[in-house]
Image (cartoon, rainbow, N blue to C red):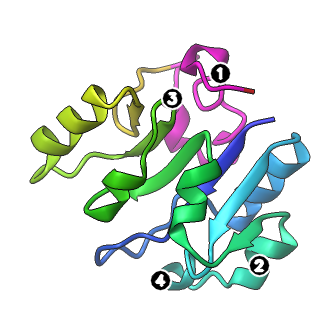
Amino acid sequence: MLIIGLPKERSNEFRVGLTPARVKELSSQGHKVVVECGAGQAADISDQEYEAAGAYLVEQVEHVFEIAHLIVKIIEPQGTELDMLRQGQVILAYPNEVTEATSTRNVVISGLSYVAYEAPSKYRGWFPFFRSENFSSSPMFMDSSLNVPA
């Protein structure tokens, strides 16, 4: 079982890393999805929708980072989130061009794995992160090559 964490975005970001539909799909595959309360608010997704899809809601972002093997965000972890990352975690996010050099360097030094949404190459003729109907079932999304503990 993979524990997937969805923290609330900290900047003026109106997208969310996982929708309730993806949470439901991941939960049905036996994974646990931990969502910070309010994570979908900017995208007009309620906590109740995430809960109905099978997510576990937590009040504090620290709990998301503490237990998740995989952190799914839109913007890379920043500020205090960087202090919450731990060795062995996988981060899935867009790197921020302004802070990319510093933050990405810190992520690499800390023993984390970082998968930028735009980085994966074509798999079977399509980019797995941009084909919405198969997002979480993509072999590149949760594959043993990511070395995420089960």
Task: Between residue 13 and residue 124, name the one nearer to us.
Answer: 13
Q: Secondary structure at mark 4?
A: helix
Q: Nearer the viewer, mark 3 or mark 2?
A: 3
Give x and y (percent) for residue 137.
Answer: 72, 34
Of the numbered discs 1 and 3, the one sitting upstream in the chain is 3
Give x and y (percent) for residue 85.
Answer: 42, 46
Instruction: Identify residue for label 4.
Output: 42
Of the numbered discs 1 and 4, the one sitting upstream in the chain is 4
Task: Report the amino acid beneath label 3.
Answer: Gly
Of the numbered discs 2 and 4, the one sitting upstream in the chain is 4
Instruction: Identify residue for label 3.
Output: 88
Determine whether 7 is above or below 52 in the image.
above
Q: Secondary structure at mark 3?
A: loop
Instruction: Identify residue for label 1.
Output: 143
Q: Secondary structure at mark 2?
A: helix
Instruction: Identify residue for label 2.
Output: 49
Report the predominant secondary structure element of the magenta stretch: loop
Q: Is residue 111 visible?
A: yes
Q: CA distance from mark 3 to mark 2?
A: 30 Å
Of the numbered discs 3 and 2, the one sitting upstream in the chain is 2
Q: CA distance from mark 1 to mark 4?
A: 30 Å
Q: Which range is magenta?
A: 123-149
Give x and y (percent) for residue 64.
Answer: 59, 59
Task: Report the amino acid beneath label 2.
Answer: Glu
Left or right? Give the position of 24 relative to 19.
Answer: right
Instruction: Identify the residue at horizontal 41%, vertical 33% (top origin).
Output: 115
